[in-house]
Image (cartoon, rainbow, N blue to C red):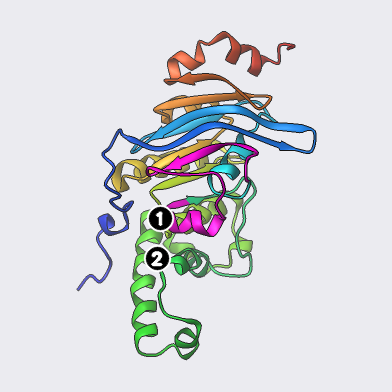
Amino acid sequence: MNLRPDPRELAAPDDGIAKGAMLLEVKNVSLSFGGVKAITNISFDILKGEIRAIIGPNGAGKTSMLNVINGFYTPQQGTIVFRGEERRAMKPHHAVRQGIARTFQNVALFKGMSTLDNIMAGRSVKMKRGLGWQMLWHGPALAEEIEHREKVEEIIDFLEIQHIRRTPVGKLPYGLQKRVELGRALAMEPSLLLLDEPMAGMNLEEKEDMSRFIIDVNQQRGTTIALIEHDMGVVMDLSDRVVVLDYGKKIADGVPDAVKANKQVIDAYLGVAH
C-alpha cells in the first residue's frame, strides 16, 4: 500500500484568490540604510499563479526587495498588501505562517544534518504538538511526526533526490544543496515562493534541472513564484512578467519580450553611464 501523499496535498493552500488575481502588491516602498537608498518608491504586483522575475544589475536592490516582502526589513515608506491584508512591518516567522517562503542567495542549510532532516525543518511551522510531546516522541507527537515525514518523503521524490536523503548536506555538491534548500521551502507549503538567485553558481545541466523543477512547482503545485535571477536566458524562458530595478529604482515592468527590448534595460545591463 502506498502511504505517500498525493502531490496535490502539498500544493499551495487555497486562499480564496482566483488564478490571475492579485496575490501581492508592493506600494511605493522605499528603504534606506543610513544615507544609502537601497529602494526608492517602488511599486509592482504579483498575480496568483505566475512566475514573476525581479532582475537588475548587482546592487540594484533586488534582494532588499525580497527582504521587505518576507518581513526581514521594514521599509521607511510604503506598504505591502498580501492576500488583501495591508502591512508595513512583519516578522519573517509571521510571513512564513501567512504563506511566504524563500530560499537565499547563499545556501542557508544545516550542513551537518541530512537532506531529509533539513527538509523536515521546513515542516516545523506546520507542527502543532508542543516541545514536551516532541521530546517524549510518543502518542500524538509520534503520529504527527509520521504524517510530516510522509510529506517530506513526497518532496524528496518530487525533487528526485532520493539517493541523497540520508547524506549530510555539507557533503553535497552546490547544485544539490540548492535543490535541498528548495525542498525545505516547499515543505512550508507556501502560497508565494521567493527564490533568490536559485541558479547562481550552477553549470548548464544543473540550471536545466532547476528550471524544470521551478516550472513543475508553479504548474503542478500551483505555487506563485517570485525569483531573482541574473541569467537572462532563464528569465526570459521562465517568467510570465519581469520587473527591472536599477540603483534601487524601477526602470521597466512587463512581459519578457517588452522588457528585453526596453532601452533603459539594455543600457543598465550594458553598463552605460547614468
Crowdedness near tag 2: few (<14), some (14–19) or many (≥20) residues, C-alpha within 10 Å: many
In this figure, which residue is indicated by the disc labeled 1? 160
Q: In this orientation, which residue lies closer to the viewer: 80 or 135? A: 80
Q: CA distance from mark 2 to mark 1?
A: 12 Å
> Which label was assigned to residue 152?
2
What is the x, y in percent for residue 34? 79, 38
Amino acid at the residue labelled 2: Val
At a point 41% along the width and 72% down the height, the residue shown is: 127
Amino acid at the residue labelled 1: Glu
At a point 58% along the width and 43% down the height, the residue shown is: 68
- Disc 2 or disc 1, which is closer to the eye? 2
Q: Quadrant of residue 265?
A: top right
Residue 256 is at least partly visible in this image: yes
74 relative to 13, above or below: above
Q: Quadrant of residue 29?
A: top right
| Residue 1 relative to residue 159: left or right | left
Q: Quadrant of the C terminus?
A: top right
At a point 63% along the width and 46% down the height, the residue shown is: 73
What is the x, y in percent for residue 241? 42, 26
Q: Quadrant of residue 228?
A: top right
What is the x, y in percent for residue 230? 59, 30
Residue 234 is at least partly visible in this image: no
Q: Secondary structure at mark 1?
A: loop
The mark tally for this picture is 2
Residue 82 painted magenta: yes
The segment highlighted magenta reads 74-100
